[in-house]
């Protein structure tokens, strides 16, 4: 099947008014039962967790894939991810972003698309070290980032709204009018979210450490992206959903943390799959991690919401089984031969060459079969029980 691409020219764009749906806090999950609720210390077995509110309300559906998404309050960037918005500058680009930076200082960009040096067309609302500000339309490389910003603001981790509309940039309630001419967002490359997409190798990319609550791009006054944070209700994958085009945008590099998590005594389970059944229970299947012998708490997390079922899963010792093999001696001989046996361990440990004791037979020298008894020796297999 041939793949077709849709290209939108900003020059031909038409103003579209789309209202964003505000993110609603998820109802906390509630665990009812874990089936089965026992297993070996080696883990690796699959359990089913039943309960309610594992799957939140669906607000968005990808027009192409049909995948369903639920809203998040914000999307956290940790300095390793970015999202390619697909927006190119074919006209006048405006933007609006609701955000807060992380606690650590450094350098980063909320969004950007930079032309190659030395024609440095600044790209983004950025922060560097202890200050931040807006860079725009620079025709020469700046000596310092601070000298290229129309405003310098002390670095903080508070939530802010920044917008650039025409020749006016606004941080929260404070407006800044350009004093050097047209305030343009210009770039050769696609606009990245969470990075500035500077690819000439002279000045490096700066990746965001912080949260984005919403982001919009306009081109020639037409709204072309209206991004809200979401996660896939089946897989837990996080990203941004464009409600203009009904399309999900995941990370282009790195990975966001998953919205779903199951832990056994704080240890993450694997292969988490969530299924909704609104008439009875939601279910989660997952692979149990390894743990020492004992009974532990199991927790289910849906982003920032969590429920814990206390002392709900028991790790049992692995079982070592000694299986004697048939042997015999000739009537009238004095010495019994050593009775061989095979060891197996349901925890998957290699028992080659291991010994855990010896077998003896009941007394008697007449021809016939004799019952075997086992004499265990000291052995060093932790968290195991023994049988034969």
Image (spheres, rainbow, N blue to C red):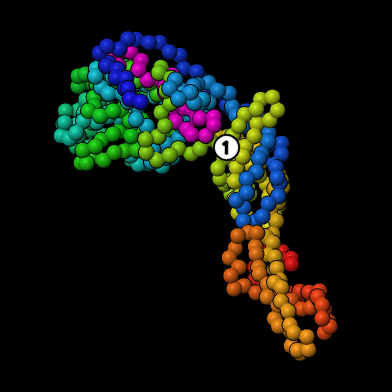
| Residue that appears at 20% across and 41% down | 202
| Residue that appears at 71% across and 83% down | 337
| Residue that appears at 29% across and 19% down | 7
Compared across the picture, whether 267 is left or right of 195 comes to: right
Expressed as whole percent of the image width and height from the top left, the position of residue 88 reads 27, 23
Q: Is residue 214 visible?
A: no
Q: Which image quarter: residue 129?
A: top left
Expressed as whole percent of the image width and height from the top left, the position of residue 59 reads 53, 21
Q: Quadrant of the C terminus?
A: bottom right
Compared across the picture, whether 203 is left or right of 59 comes to: left
Expressed as whole percent of the image width and height from the top left, the position of residue 92 reads 26, 17
Q: Which image quarter: residue 131?
A: top left
165 to 198, vertically: above or below: above
Total count of labels: 1
Q: Is residue 16 visible?
A: yes
Expressed as whole percent of the image width and height from the top left, the position of residue 258 reads 51, 37
The residues colored magenta run 219-243
SS category of the residue bearing label 1: strand
| Residue picked out by circle 1 | 273
Which one is in front, 13 or 114? 13
Q: Quadrant of the N terminus?
A: top left
| Residue that appears at 64% across and 42% down | 299
């Amino acid at each position: 099947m041939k793949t077709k691409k849709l290209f939108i020219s900003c020059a031909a764009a038409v103003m579209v008014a789309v209202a964003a749906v505000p993110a609603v806090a998820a109802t906390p999950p509630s665990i009812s039962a874990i089936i089965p609720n026992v297993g070996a210390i080696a883990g690796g077995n699959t359990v089913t967790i039943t309960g309610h509110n594992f799957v939140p309300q669906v607000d968005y559906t990808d027009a192409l894939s049909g995948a369903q998404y639920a809203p998040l309050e914000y999307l956290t960037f940790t300095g390793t991810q970015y999202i390619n918005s697909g927006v190119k500058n074919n006209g006048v680009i405006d933007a609006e972003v609701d955000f807060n930076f992380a606690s650590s200082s450094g350098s980063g960009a909320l969004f950007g698309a930079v032309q190659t040096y030395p024609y440095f067309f600044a790209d983004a609302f950025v922060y560097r070290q202890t200050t931040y500000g807006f860079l725009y339309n620079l025709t020469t490389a700046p000596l310092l980032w601070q000298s290229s910003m129309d405003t310098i603001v002390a670095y903080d981790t508070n939530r802010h709204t920044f917008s650039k509309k025409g020749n006016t940039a606004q941080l929260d309630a404070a407006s800044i009018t350009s004093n050097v001419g047209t305030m343009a967002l210009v770039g050769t490359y696609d606009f990245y979210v969470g990075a500035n997409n500077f690819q000439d190798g002279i000045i490096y990319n700066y990746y965001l450490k912080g949260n984005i609550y919403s982001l919009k791009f306009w081109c020639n006054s037409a709204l072309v992206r209206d991004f809200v944070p979401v996660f896939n209700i089946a897989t837990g994958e996080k990203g941004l959903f464009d409600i203009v085009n009904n399309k999900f945008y995941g990370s282009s590099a790195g990975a966001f943390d998953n919205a779903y998590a199951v832990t056994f005594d704080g240890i993450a389970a694997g292969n988490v799959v969530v299924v909704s059944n609104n008439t009875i229970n939601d279910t989660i299947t997952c692979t149990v991690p390894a743990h020492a012998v004992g009974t532990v708490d199991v927790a289910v997390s849906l982003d920032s919401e969590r429920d814990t079922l206390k002392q709900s899963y028991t790790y049992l010792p692995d079982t070592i089984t000694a299986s004697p093999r048939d042997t015999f001696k000739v009537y009238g001989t004095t010495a019994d031969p050593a009775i061989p046996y095979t060891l197996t361990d349901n925890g998957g440990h290699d028992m080659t060459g291991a010994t855990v004791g010896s077998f003896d037979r009941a007394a008697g020298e007449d021809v016939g079969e004799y019952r075997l008894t086992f004499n265990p020796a000291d052995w060093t297999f932790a968290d195991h029980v023994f049988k034969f």
